[in-house]
Amino acid sequence: MSMPTSKLRLGPLPKTETVKVTIALTTVLKADLERYASLHAQTYGEPVDTATLIPHMLEAFMARDRGFRKSRTK
């Protein structure tokens, strides 16, 4: 499966301290995350699994959410 190696919204992952949280995903979302992890590994040359991607994706999502950012400044 050859995918174009354009820039992804989620860039290279920083090393961070973590806390374990358990979540339930739909099978479609899990498959999409696995495909994203594969593309991310191809793009940045470092293998990554879905469990590592999820916190970074959530952090990026919340950083771009204007309503959330506004609520933090109040």
Image: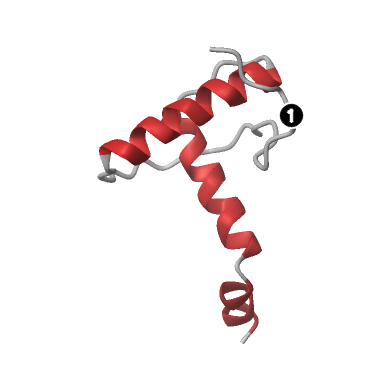
- Please state which of residues 45 and 52 is positioned toward the viewer in this rendering: 45
Instruction: Classify residue 12 as left or right of residue 30.
Output: right
Q: What is the x, y in percent for residue 68? A: 56, 73
Q: What is the x, y in percent for residue 65? A: 60, 67
Q: Which amino acid lies under the numbered mark 1 shown in the image of this protein?
A: Ser
Q: What is the x, y in percent for residue 27? A: 27, 36
Residue at 29% of width from left, 43% of height from top?
Answer: 25
In the orientation shown, which residue stands out farthest toward the bottom?
A: 74
Instruction: Classify residue 9 as left or right of residue 18.
Output: right
Dot 1: few (<14), some (14–19), or many (≥20) neighbours within 10 Å? few
In the orientation shown, which residue stands out farthest toward the right?
A: 7
Instruction: Classify residue 27 as left or right of residue 58.
Output: left
Residue at 65% of width from left, 40% of height from top?
Answer: 10
- Please state which of residues 41 and 3 is positioned toward the viewer in this rendering: 3
Residue at 62% of width from left, 31% of height from top?
Answer: 15
- Please state which of residues 56 and 15 is positioned toward the viewer in this rendering: 56
Residue under pointer 1:
6
Q: Is residue 55 above or below residue 33?
A: below
Instruction: Classify residue 71 as left or right of residue 19.
Output: right
Q: Quadrant of the C terminus?
A: bottom right
Total labels: the figure holds 1
Residue at 69% of width from left, 31% of height from top?
Answer: 12
Q: Give the image's coloring scheme.
A: secondary structure
Which element carries disc 1, helix, strand or loop?
loop
